[in-house]
Image (cartoon, grey):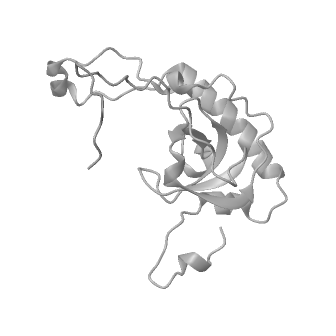
Amino acid sequence: VKKFDWYPAEDQKRQPRRKQAGAPKLRKGIEEGSVLILTSGRYRGRRVVFLKQLPSGLLLVSGPFKVNGVPLKRVNQVYTITTSTKVKTAGADVSKVTDATFKDKSAKSKGRDIFNENQKKTRSAERTTLQKSVDDALLKNLKADKTACIMEYMRARFSLSRNDKVHAMKF
């Protein structure tokens, strides 16, 4: 056992960590326009187009909604599979989209609100117009794409069956 010659008279408190954790780096192969496969959540198995990385580190993706029903949403890159397919994103202006876009604007719920569960949530007009503008640009680019069956590829769900060898697959 190592012996120390000096001990502090009072217990010293350790300084708390002041360094802020930054946004995680993008995984190799994820670029603007990359087609990703979602592996969890409501839209698991759906193919989506990567638009940009948000300041929080989450990925901004879209279906487009008219093709496969996936709206503009934030996704952690851990829950995606990167494919080699790329789609042009020209015209899709997502510069104004931040994490605040996805925050619920309604007031904090009271305890009595559980009795109002029959009321449907409505989407803000701002989100609807944003979704439409991004979808229109992506749809235009998908239709102009020369890749064979790209629309059918985006519509199809991804799933694995018993004899699929995932380690040998090329995404």
Given the current orientation, which residue lies at the most extreme bottom position? 163
Residue 15, x across and y down, in percent: 37, 22
Q: Is residue 80 left or right of residue 145?
A: left
Q: Nearer the viewer, residue 102 or 66?
A: 102
User: Residue at horizontal 50%, vertical 44%?
Assistant: 76
**Where the C terminus falls, by quadrant?**
bottom right
User: Residue at horizontal 64%, vertical 57%?
Assistant: 154
Residue 64, x across and y down, in percent: 63, 45
Given the current orientation, which residue lies at the most extreme top position? 107
Q: Is residue 6 left or right of residue 29?
A: left
Q: Is residue 168 above or below residue 4?
A: below
Q: Quadrant of residue 117?
A: top left
Q: Quadrant of residue 156?
A: bottom right
User: Residue at horizontal 55%, vertical 36%?
Assistant: 57
Q: Nearer the viewer, residue 148 or 85?
A: 85
Residue 162, x across and y down, in percent: 44, 82
Q: Is residue 62 left or right of residue 151?
A: left
Q: Nearer the viewer, residue 160 or 147?
A: 160
Given the current orientation, which residue lies at the most extreme front position? 5
Tally the numbered discs.
0
Residue 71, x across and y down, in percent: 54, 40
Q: Is residue 75 above or below residue 78?
A: above
